[in-house]
Amino acid sequence: MAKLFVNCSKTSFGNALGVPHFLLQICAQLRLRHEIIFVAKDIDAIERNSSVDLLKDHAHSIISMDEARRSSEAEGRNAIEILPHHFQRSEICDTSIMICHDTHAFDIPWKYPNAERLQRQFKEDLTKASVVMTHFPRTFYGVEHIAQIKLSHLYLTPSPLMLDTTFKTASFVNKTGRKTLLYPAQLQEHKNHKALIQAISRFGDAAPEFEILCTGTDSDSNFSKELFSLIDEFGVADRISFLGRLANGELIKQYHQCDGVIIPSLAEGGAYVALEAIAAGKPVAINSIEAAKMHLRSVSAEVIWFDAHNIADVQSAITTLCESQPAQWFERNKRAREKINDATWSRTAELWNTVIESLSRGAPLPKMHIDVDGSVLGYF
């Protein structure tokens, strides 16, 4: 059993979604074999956080950075630091495992005030980690080329659903005649809500009856105001609504009740929202970025591709979704749903455990066997 010190100094459990959610899911499995210790720079802040009970459920203890350093020194190589985010470096242990989620610093540099500095940090942090783990095919295959670095120990794992939207049969609850499309995403510029607003404005009186429901955190009040001003400018408030951040149960309900899911995001690590929609038995229209293509190909998924930079193409995707037959898409993605169900957190943890046990013994790290589409078969 190893002692895993999870460095939470860059993890915002109260605001961010993907990074902390992934971390908690993998820790819930790793704690069955190892001692999980969450490390915080500000223990008082963690104790005041509304997520503290959830954190305690997934860790054996929560300690300060100073206490973690003292404890790790006594453990020797049995102490391994988990770095949940790719913009941080080891502060506790000599041995570390970093989770690399995406390459946004290079893909959408305009998102960041000081992109060049962040790119340098990204490269330095990844190369200093003992092991880099990723759950997205595009990140695995592309990070070294994109960042112009060489990683000696880079691994790909499955991408289990972070939100279980699984529905056993096709669900068609909409009897109003007005199609409901769903877009779950934080209100950030690269999520590209503007393209939806502009595309909606192009529909005239002959347009299909539809509404788009957007769910997600209001992470930038200035940007949110900009979105709502654009909605007023184009006069489309009757066709697009923002529901804010929903509890998991409410979001799953939206997946089950909608007629389709549309994803115009300009940059992602993979295609988690599309996988959640497919698991719920819904047709999906998604911007044809490389990360989404590679992720969806790894599970043999079929979707409606469009170019989110082309507003006419976004409009066409909305129309196609509104005209889609859900039962047909449910059948077309039967194999994809099987593969999504096969990608479990316990299976992912097995691969992590193979790496962790090698590190704690000082043994050679495992090699990875993988097929051409990015379906991980195992480490040996």
Image: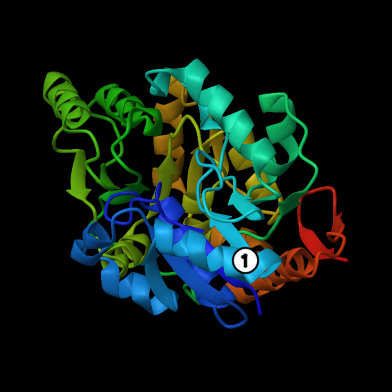
347 lies left or right of 266 = right
**Number of numbered markers:** 1
Q: Position of residue 197 (x, y in %)?
A: 27, 28
Residue 343 picture location, percent across and down: 64, 68
Residue type, mark 1 in image: Ala
Residue 202 point in image, percent of width and height:
29, 21
Picture quadrant where residue 300 is located: bottom right
Q: Which residue is drawn at the image coordinates 66% and 45% (left, top)? A: 129
The relative height of residue 140 versus residue 8 in the rendered view (above or below) is above
Q: Is residue 106 left or right of residue 170?
A: right
Q: Is residue 111 above or below residue 360?
A: above
* In the depicted structure, whether residue 316 falls above or below residue 216: above
What is the residue that sits farthest to the bottom in this orientation?
32
Residue 32 is situated, as x and y percent measured from the top left of the image, at 57, 83
Q: Quadrant of the N terminus?
A: bottom right
Q: Which image quadrant is residue 75 in? A: bottom right
Q: Is residue 106 visible?
A: no
Quadrant (top left, top right, bottom left, bottom right) of the C terminus:
bottom right
Which SS class for mark 1? strand
User: According to the image, label 1 marks what residue?
Assistant: 79
**Is residue 122 rendered to the left or right of residue 66?**
right
Residue 227 or residue 363, whichever sits in front: 363
Q: Is residue 320 visible?
A: yes
